[in-house]
């Protein structure tokens, strides 16, 4: 595999899960907020269904980012991570992405669970 393709996969693997979780978190907040507003109740938005769909999409992107990091890790396995130059950097970021995406997948799942089993809307 060419180095430029490995670098693209490396960056997607490194940032894909984080961006998917951040997007899910912001969109999920908007969905929850719309479910608690008067307009959202009038529209009859299926808040739980929307939260699960957004969570599944974020989880799929995070798993794809993990798979990209795994491909890069396997392609650069023979490279020592302390090696100078881009090959060592690519391998190091792939290792970091493998761990990070597992953590982001857990965060996405916990975010979906907490938004589905939320407390009913209350005025503060």
Image (cartoon, helix red, strand yellow):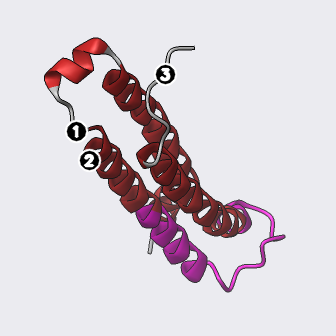
Q: Secondary structure at mark 2?
A: helix
Residue 86 occupies quadrant: bottom right
Front position in the image: 19 or 58: 58
Residue 64 magenta-highlighted: yes
* Residue 11 visible, this angle: no
Q: Quadrant of the N terminus?
A: bottom left
Location of residue 32 with respect to 100 vertically, above or below: above
Q: Secondary structure at mark 3?
A: loop
Residue sitting at the far bottom:
78
Q: Quadrant of the C terminus?
A: top right
Residue 41: x %, y % from top left: 23, 22
- 68 sits to left or right of 89: left
- Which circle, 3 or 2, is nearer the viewer? 3
Front position in the image: 93 or 23: 23
- Count of marks, rendered view: 3
Q: Are marks 2 and 1 in contact (CB under 8 Å)?
A: yes
Residue 24: x %, y % from top left: 44, 41
The residue that mark 2 highlights is 49
The disc, 3 or 2, on the residue closer to the chain's N-terminal end is 2
Spatial separation of the CA atoms under disc 1 and disc 3? 18 Å
Residue 100: x %, y % from top left: 65, 60
Q: Which residues are magenta?
A: 63-90
Q: Residue at x 22, y 39 (%)?
A: 46
């Amino acid at each position: 595999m060419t180095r430029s393709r490995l670098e693209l996969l490396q960056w997607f693997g490194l940032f894909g899960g984080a961006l998917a979780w951040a997007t899910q978190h912001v969109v999920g907040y908007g969905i929850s907020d719309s479910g608690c507003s008067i307009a959202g109740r009038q529209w009859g938005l299926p808040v739980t269904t929307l939260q699960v769909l957004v969570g599944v999409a974020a989880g799929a992107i995070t798993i794809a980012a993990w798979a990209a990091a795994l491909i890069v890790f396997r392609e650069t396995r023979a490279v020592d991570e302390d090696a100078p130059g881009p090959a060592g950097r690519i391998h190091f970021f792939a290792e970091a992405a493998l761990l990070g995406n597992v953590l982001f997948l857990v965060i996405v799942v916990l975010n979906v669970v907490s938004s589905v089993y939320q407390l009913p809307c209350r005025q503060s």
